[in-house]
Structure formats: structure tokens, C-alpha cells
Image (tube, rainbow, N blue to C red):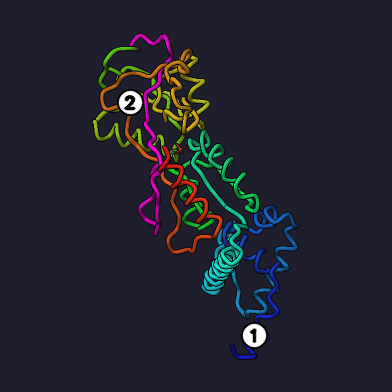
Amino acid sequence: MPASTLARFQRITPQQLRAFEASARLLSVTRAAKELCVSQPTVSVQLRELASTLGEPLFQQHGRSIQLTQAGEALYGTVRELAACWQRLESRLADIHGLVRGRLKLAAVTTAEYFVPDLLGSFAAAHPGVDIELAIENRDRVVGRLEQGLDDLVVMMMPPEHLPLASLEFQTNPLVVIAPAAHRLARQALTLQDLAQERWLMREPGSGTRMAAEQHFKKQRFEPAVAMSLGSNEAIKHAVAAGLGIAVLSRLAIFPPLWPAAGSSEVAAFKEPLTMLQVDGFPLSRHWYVVWRNDHPLSAAARHFLQYLEAKVETT
Ligand code: PGA
């Protein structure tokens, strides 16, 4: 590298890059400062110094928010490449020592919260050198995280098609129709049309469960009378139990965990106050995937987690 280039970029500090990365990702200096636990003026100063070193403005004001300039976009790409290089180095060092160290950044859709922590328990015990971060969000937000490349691995039911992703399918995720235990249509063979007069409770827009249910209803030309949208599986379960309506939900939200002990009876666990309706076409057969960006290298910790998951799938 020419000495003049080196001299110029040597003035860039890790703090400036962190301030820039967070501001570029969140498109907000205030949110970046909050995430980095520093004051907003500190971030602004770091961004100003960085821009002056590069001789280019990095952000432009757009109404009340900020946007990256062309130079900002170029720097953001470089910062992400740098992060990928460090990650590759981390993997190589871990390989040299035969040890897995580092951070495993995972995101999972809300319905996966019923089993992902269980999976992490035994992985963490076997890999004490790995720091695990788990973010739980609904599908829309998880897709946003994938777009930004925030996580090593993501657990979800419906991977988006617009991103370069690799995936491992590891478990079924049947979606069922639940109703209060004393529902008049319980224990009868039903079609969706039999449920046309029911009040349907849906997960919030952005939820994968809602998206899967809506896709199925559309295919069946069924228009549910949606009485309410609720922001979590637990809220749906309670609302259904309280007699507010019926809903489509992952069976895992009702029968956690993912790998029940051999011989355990789901039916025994499934007493009051909910029941599953026997609706033609249900359970909807969906699957859980762990997905990752195939344009980013996987960290050693992520590779080990995938191996662990593969071994777990083979033994179930
Ligand atoms: P949800 O997502 O928890 O947002 O409903 C399920 C999924 O997308 O897999």
C-alpha cells in the first residue's frame, strides 16, 4: 500500500469506525449513541473527524433522518468487509488452537423462542469460550436484520427469497387451529368454511405465522373474520382461552419444547383451556430453518453451532 494512503487511513480510529458503522446501520446518530452507550455529541465528533480524514461528507440530512452519501456507502461497504476479514481471522485462529472462541450472534423469530434457548443450553455448555447473543423478533424484523447482515445465523420458518442465503432445514413446524377447550366445534371434522362465522385472532402484521395463515386462506379463497391482531403467541393463547376467538398458531407454541422426551404424551399436556380444531388442510406443514448470508463468511462459532445442530437433527 502506498505510504501516503497508509498515512491518511492510519488516522482513522476504531471508535470512529464503530460510531460510523452504528450510525450507517441505524441511520440515526441518536440511536447509534444509545447503542454504543456514549453521548450524541461524541458520535457526531467522531463522524466529523472521520469525514475530514476522508475528505468527503459521509451522511446527508434527509428531512428528520440521515442518509449515506456515495462516499458513506463506499465506507460502509469497506467497514463490512473489514468485519468479515476479522471474522475470518478469528475462525483461523480458532482452527489453529482447535478451540472455538468468539461470539455467536443469533436471531430467531418469536415462535422459535419456545425451543432455541433449549438448543443453546447444551451448545453453550459444550463451548464455554463462545459468547452467545440471541435476538428474538418477528419475521419482518428478522428479515431486516438479515438484510443488514447483523447476525451469524437466523432461525425462521419462511426464509426470504430476495437475499443470498444458505439454509439448513432442521425441524417441522406444524401450524394448527386452536380454540377454547369447550368450543362447540371441538372434536368434529371441519372445513375452513365451517369456521366462516368465527372470530379469528391473528398475530400482528410482520409475523411469519400470520403470513403463512394468510397465504393458506388466500389459496383456499377463505376470508376469515379477523376480530383482533395480537403481538405475541402468548397473547393469542390467552385471548383464545378467554373465548375471544380462534387462531392459527405453531404447535410448538402450545407444546414446547422442540424435542419432547420419548413417550411423552402431547395430548396429556394439552388439557384445559385450549383445544386443536380438526380442520381440513391443517396442520399446515411448515419447517424450521437456520439460515445465513452466503456472501458473508461464517465465524468458527457459527460453523460449530451448525455442526451441533446437524448432529442433533441426525439423532432425532
Ligand atoms: P413469527 O414468525 O414468530 O413472526 O410469527 C414465524 C416465522 O416466520 O417463522
Q: Position of residue 244 (x, y in %)?
A: 46, 17
Q: Position of residue 263 (x, y in %)?
A: 44, 23
The amino acid beneath tag 1 is: Leu
* Nearer to us in this view, 66 or 247: 247
* Nearer to us in this view, 233 or 89: 89
**In the rendered structure, does residue 54 fall within the stretch colored magenta?**
no
The answer to whether one can see residue 72 in this image is no
Q: Nearer the viewer, mark 1 or mark 2?
A: 1
Q: Who comes first in sequence, dot 1 or dot 2? A: 1
Residue at (52%, 54%) from the top-left corner? 304
Q: Residues within 10 Å of mark 2 (few under 14, many from 20)?
A: some
Which residue has dot 1 on it?
6
Which quadrant would the C terminus be assigned to in this image?
top left
* Nearer to us in this view, 9 or 258: 258
Q: Which residues are magenta?
A: 157-186
Q: Position of residue 165 (x, y in %)?
A: 40, 56
Q: Position of residue 314 (x, y in %)?
A: 40, 43
Task: Relative to 294, say whether 135 is above or below.
Answer: above
From this viewpoint, which residue is outermost toward the bottom?
A: 3
The answer to whether one can see residue 188 in this image is yes
Badge number at residue 224:
2
Residue at (35%, 12%) from the top-left corner? 186
Under tag 2, what secondary structure?
A: loop
The amino acid beneath tag 2 is: Pro
Residue at (41%, 45%) from the top-left corner? 289
Q: Spatial distance from mark 1 to mark 2, Cα to Cα? A: 63 Å
Under tag 1, what secondary structure?
A: helix
Q: Is residue 273 left or right of residue 30?
A: left
Task: Relative to 126, say whether 19 is above or below.
Answer: below
Badge number at residue 253:
none
Q: Residues within 10 Å of mark 1 (few under 14, many from 20)?
A: few
